[in-house]
Amino acid sequence: MTAASLTRRRFIVTSAAVAGALVVGVTVRGLRRPSLRGAGAGSVLNAFVRIAPSGQVTLVMPKVEMGQGTYTSLPMLIAEELEVDLDKVTLEAAPPDPAVYGFPVDPEAPEGIERDQATGTSLSIIQCWTPLRQAGATARLMLLQAAAKRWRVPLDSCHAEHAEIVHAPSGRRATYGTLARAAAALPLPAAPPLKDPKSFRLIGRATPRRDTPSKVNGSAVFGIDARPPRAKVAVLAISPVSGGRIAGPLASDTALAVRGVTQVVDEGDVVAVVAEHTWAAVKGMQALKPQWTGGDNATVQQAAIVAELESAVREPGVIAATKGNPGAAGAHAATHHEAVYHQPFLAHATLEPMNCTVDWRKDKCEIWVGTQVPDRAVAKLADLGLTPPQIELHNHLIGGGFGRRLEVDGIVIAARIARHVEGPVRVLWPRTEDIQHDRYRPYYVDRLSAALDAHGRPLSWRHTIAGAGLWALYYGEATVPKGIDYDAVTSAGDLVYPLENMEVRFVRRDPPGVPTGWWRGVGPTRSVFVVESFIDELAAAAQQDPVRYRRALLKDPRMLAVLELAADRAGWGMGLPAGSGRGVSIQHAFGSYLAQVVEVSVNEKGAPRVERVVCAMDCGQVVNPDGVRAQLEGGVTFGLSAALANEITIADGRVQQSNFNDFHSLRIADAPRIETHVLASREAPGGVGETGTACVAAALCNAIFAATGKRVRTLPVSRGLKV
């Protein structure tokens, strides 16, 4: 994302009204000014830094922490320019206020979409890179000006270091805290130049995660850990069929007879047993034994959904991207190649199950939760008669988001239950409810065809995608021009290969009775699998080495560089034991370039085992190398879990999977060795958190082909190898 153009007037707001603190804010053009008591002229803040008279530096975080490392990387941006040590910066979660803390959804997205306060799509560093650094640099300049004025010395004779202003000629020093009030009273300076990367002390240096100690010793507070005084516990059960309702009277008396159970709440499509503690609520739900009607979706079957998509992918659809004249170019082909790919419904299965604690009072609703979209949560509660001023939301650490907590259905359900309960209530989803009532990554069917010249190079490329319209479902139909789902065609309509004749079409089919949503890797995770698998098929059809084939098609030097690095570090071309193979996949997504090589071995029963994954990345300027490596390792592991064995299937409108016994995550014993190699770059930062997940499935399946000669076109691999 190109950083918003910031001017002096739009950039900074200062105030001496908060106990003499220096308040520095970052603005994004076009937003209203916030209600900051005593604030000077300026525009609205999306993030701001406070420096108190005590010297305490507080960063109000515009993003949430869900394991991706923002609580370390974003404070590094402020600390770098402000010249303070990282451990001197404390964090405060931003309240739900997209006008202050929001960013544009995506600079390349369709017009008409408002800013939001979401943490997702690997945008945290991209969006905050310039604004937070400018906030730190401006605060530093104002403190320098305050010190120079106090000492009556030239500004350029002073410098900042370790939260102090130093006048080297005289040896005088002043802490930021003692200068904060005077700095806040100064006129607004023009935005100062940012540091030259050569001068970075923190950015680019491997830095331990700040949240690791508390997560290791158990003191970290996630949403599920919130325990307001006198809070009760509610365990819920939701209709197993979307649209279903409670059938007949509940066995409420039996549930209430369980010691500790205080209440049964019946909302029709969801019921809850409220108790003094979790075990009583669980036993109460077992005694309640809710029975459900199926409703209109009780006849929905997986086979019918798949058949509909297989038919849809042969429809004309709408053109999402086109270049040249694919029809005319294909007329001169030596050969043609076509393939159809299937990708299943997927659950998020976050380590921390869905939960939300709510205290519903007469004139106020207080919420404790971990959410990727605090602003969306508040907005959705309007359906229950609440207005934003009535809602106080405490956002906590998230034990895995992966897109699941971009949805706020769990918060709305918790509020519906809390309306019937006196005092705070911790609404918990058992793992079965979590798996069986997710917002699933949609089932997709892709059909690709290519016309090849005598050397096996593509003269034309056609790609049709059939699946749900997630962009419209999330942001509204008005944001989908001409019926083109922006998310579904990402990394398909903007290929990394600069082909002269290509066409990408989209056919929207929202599955009946199956709620869908974004999953880690969003559009690229579905598009890269089919594009990179099909490119591998073309290389095989041309009887060419897969790396050499890609190299010949590419022109972007950054993409070529990561491909060469991954191939070199993986020992591409070197021999492997019998029954083993290497596969490659590349992508340009989230503003970053990534190449992966996967090594697999296949046993005598035909089951693959991933032995090694080599990643080479160019994500522009790296903020925290440790964070990049960790995110690649986590993303690869998450992606392999899905590609190898994960799928959600539907029978009679009901999800068939229920827990990790039938929705598998990769176990430690099966985890491969993962190597990461990051190219040094001065380019603007790209995203990292979802890249490894989006790229790995194709490399895995290409490696299986190299080892066995069997092409996997249907995920997961456990099903695709049987097709």
Image: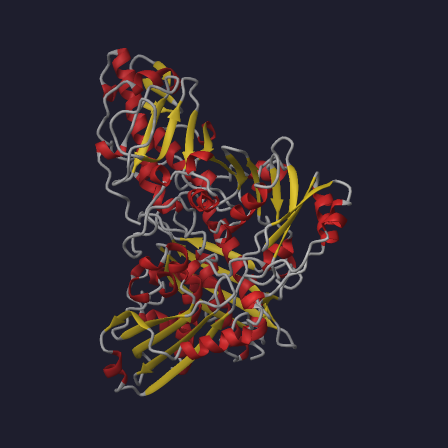
Marker count (numbered): 0
Report the residue at 65% width, 52% height from top.
430
Q: Is residue 454 above or below residue 164?
A: below
Whether residue 218 is visible to the viewer of this picture, yes or no, is yes
Name the foreground residue: 298 vs 29: 298
Residue 523, position in %: x, y? 41, 61
Q: Quadrant of the C terminus?
A: bottom right
Way the structure is coloured: secondary structure
Report the residue at 58% width, 75% height from top.
579
Report the residue at 31% width, 20% height from top.
184
Whether residue 646 is visible to the viewer of this picture, yes or no, is no
Report the residue at 31% width, 40% height from top.
130
- The quadrant in which residue 472 appears is bottom left
Residue 416, position in %: x, y? 55, 45
Name the foreground residue: 101 vs 182: 101
Q: In this view, does 192 lie above or below 499?
A: above
Residue 478, position in %: x, y? 32, 58
Residue, far front: 249
Name the foreground residue: 61 vs 651: 651
Residue 312, position in %: x, y? 41, 76
Q: In this view, does 599 lie above or below 359?
A: below
203 relative to 434 in the view: left or right = left
